[in-house]
Amino acid sequence: MAGGALAPAGVAKERAEQYQGRVTLSVIIACVVAAVGGSIFGYDIGISGGVTSMDEFLRKFFHRVYLRKQHAHENNYCKYDDQGLAAFTSSLYLAGLAASLMAGPVTRIYGRRASIICGGISFLIGAALNAGAINLAMLLLGRIMLGIGIGFGNQAVPVYLSEMAPTHLRGGLNIMFQLATTTGIFTANMVNYGTQKLRPWGWRLSLGLAAVPALLMTVGGIFLPETPNSLIEQGFNERGGKY
């Protein structure tokens, strides 16, 4: 009887160990994509604060703000009280909010990889537009594209990680996305610290460097396998059941 009681317990333990899964190449790539997806989100958030304080950037796009900044007796609110500058900062978040609403159906119908790739491409376009901006309209369009990339990336990457990660690593991989976001903010501040000394084009480098993780995210999304949940949702039950 004791042996009979121990047998089911042993079977349960064996199954639990099987469900833990292995750290395969797909899991490693998923970790990289998580880091890239989170870091580019943090980078885009952190980079704007430093860029909007650079004299060359303000002189080119927000000349009134640049002139106000020269008056040291005024507080920061008076210096940066400008509708165009507010649009530059907020357009990223507004576009991200709108894109999140579109990214949900795309992620569900066409798969997690499709959203990751769409996010990466939007990031690339936005970074290129911002780095090469010659007027405010081009600058705002670039920020909007970055916001669209954030909406798609933030929708798809955490879901992809949750569905692909082994059970014993799932929590850690999802936290990695948050860690990468804060690391991206830190990196953006360090980049701004260095590029502010590169006059007059330092701000272009700060904004354009977002293309590096965007390229990694796009290429990584192309080579990533689709999640079993997504395959089953799309009707590929046989392929999804092989995982």
Image (spheres, rainbow, N blue to C red):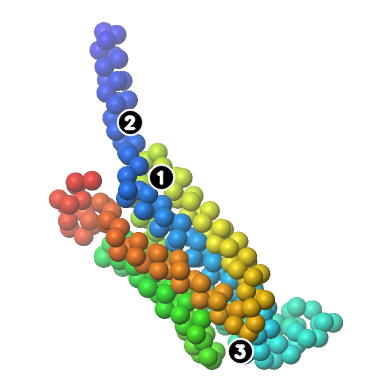
Residue 226 percent location from the top left of the image: 27, 56
* x and y, in percent, of residue 27 in the image: 35, 48
Q: Position of residue 238 (x, y in %)?
A: 14, 50
**Residue in the image at 53% along x and 70% along y:** 44
**Mark 1 residue type:** Arg
Find residue 206 and name its label: none
Image-based side of 162 in relation to 143, left or right: left
Give the amino acid at mark 3: Phe
Instruction: Determine the CA span between mark 3 and mark 2.
Output: 59 Å
Identify the residue at horizontal 33%, vertical 62% (top origin). Answer: 221
Q: Nearer the viewer, mark 3 or mark 2?
A: 3
Going from the N terminus, do you reach mark 3 or mark 2 first? 2
Label 2: which secondary element: helix
Which quadrant of the view contains residue 42?
bottom right
Identify the residue at horizontal 45%, vertical 50% (top origin). Answer: 174
Mark 3 touching mark 2, by CB under 8 A? no
Disc 3 secondary structure class? helix
Alpha carbon distance from label 1 to label 3 = 44 Å
User: Is 18 displayed left or right of 69 in the figure?
Assistant: left
Q: Residues within 10 Å of mark 1 (few under 14, many from 20)?
A: some
Across and down, in percent, residue 153 comes to 41, 65
Decide which of tag 1 and tag 3 comes sooner along the chain: 3
In this view, the residue farthest toward the left is 238
Residue pointed to by mark 2 = 17
The label shown at residue 61 is 3
Graded by Cα atoms within 10 Å as few (under 14), some (14 to 19) or many (20 or more), the crowding at tag 3 reads some
Give the residue type at disc 2: Glu
Q: Which of 177 and 107 lies nearest the eye of the viewer?
A: 177
Q: Quadrant of the N terminus?
A: top left
Q: Which mark is residue 170?
A: 1
